[in-house]
Image (cartoon, rainbow, N blue to C red):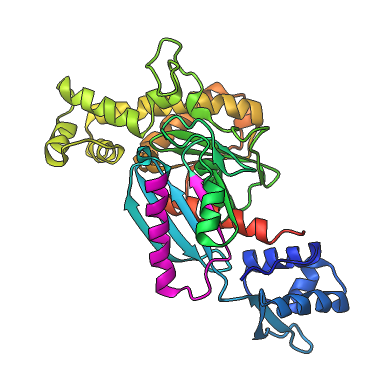
Amino acid sequence: MTARPANAYQARLLRLLRDGGRSSRAELGDQMELSRSKLAVELDQLLETGLVVAAGLAASRGGRRSHGVRLSPELRFLGVDIGATSIDVAVTNAELEIVGHLTEPSDVRRGPVPVLEQAMRMAGTLKEAALPDGFAGAGIGLPGPVRFPDGVPVAPPIMPGWDGFPVRETLSQELGCPVLVDNDANLMALGEMHAGVARSADDFLCVKIGTGIGCGIVVGGRVHRGATGSAGDIGHMQVDPQGRLCVCGNRGCLEAHFSGAALSRDAQEAVRAGRSPGLAALLDTNGRLTAADVAVAAASGDQAALELVRNGGVCVGQVIAGLVSFFNPGLVVIGGGVAGLGHTLLAAVRSEVYRRSLPLATGSLPIVLSELGNTAGMVGATRLISDHLFAAP
């Protein structure tokens, strides 16, 4: 289904039905502040395109019952969240509710061709299951800087071989539908804004801590990408001038001191130094250590694991404190795989932010964990492409 709205009224109607679900004509008229006759004209045109379908009679509001409408139940969006070590693919309905989801381990360092082939194979599996008409559009998330208008990654530090690869063009041809590509932290922010903890926030930060670290910045209900698309690349802000060497080539970056990769490295160092019996046992069992293993050890009271989490939280809090003082957000959301460290991490981040930032910025500032978890990026990806498709020409 490739029909698009003909004007701004129709675009807004589509977004209202996406975000609110089935509605009566009377309810839509109230929200749109349109006359009954003008609303009827716009809705009838949308009904002709097939984007909107009749949905029976709505509940009575005291007079004649109004007819209900909803977005087409056949409308499907594809969301792909490519991480450093995994790929998540989801299909949503028109209201962006996930109706099919697959996740598989992957390694983004293999390069764009095998990774995108894997993602398309996963999408094909979901399409065969329950998608006769194909996708209306697809949103793709990547764990690195993206030049948004072109859908092209630019010198991503943890993605060798991806620099300049035409992801948007390649997948648009493969899928036969419109495709948009963005940084994964931006998509996480969109997901939380659509269906998560940031539903009522207009100005907020969404910090994603995984193998790398990024930040989605939402200003006035819109993602702020900056002049070239690199806004929010906080993983390479310096926390220690004499610190560890980062994959970007600089020293002391936040990502070098606290990320999934850094946590795995530091956990193994703690085992070699004999400071962590809990992590040593997990290493013997699993053969390697991940952020999830550190979470398990910390939850069991392992002091070395707890220290790793707290120290990492201080580093993250130091950077977020600077962002809070500069941007003055109404909310800070923390997500990504490392956010599974939970409230020990959250407490350390909060303490550092509240200590370093001025009371005017932090007096009523919630700092919370993601509500959607690993589905945030996929929901955000479909929100991104549906915003594009449901926009006035």
User: 310 above or below 38?
Assistant: above
**With 16 as the anchor, is 87 left or right in this view?**
left
Which residue is at 75% across, 78% downward? Answer: 25
Most foreground residue, 301 or 203? 203
Q: Position of residue 242 (x, y in %)?
A: 41, 10
109 in the magenta segment: no
Quarter of the picture holding the C terminus: bottom right
Image side of residue 147 versus residue 100, left or right:
right
User: Is residue 138 shown in magenta?
Assistant: yes
Q: Identify the image quadrant of the N terminus.
A: bottom right
The quadrant in which residue 310 appears is: top left
Q: Is residue 196 visible?
A: no
Magenta region, residue range: 113-141
For residue 305, above or below residue 122: above
> Quadrant of residue 365 in the image?
top right
> What is the x, y in percent for residue 203?
65, 41
Residue at position x 50%, y 47% from top? 141
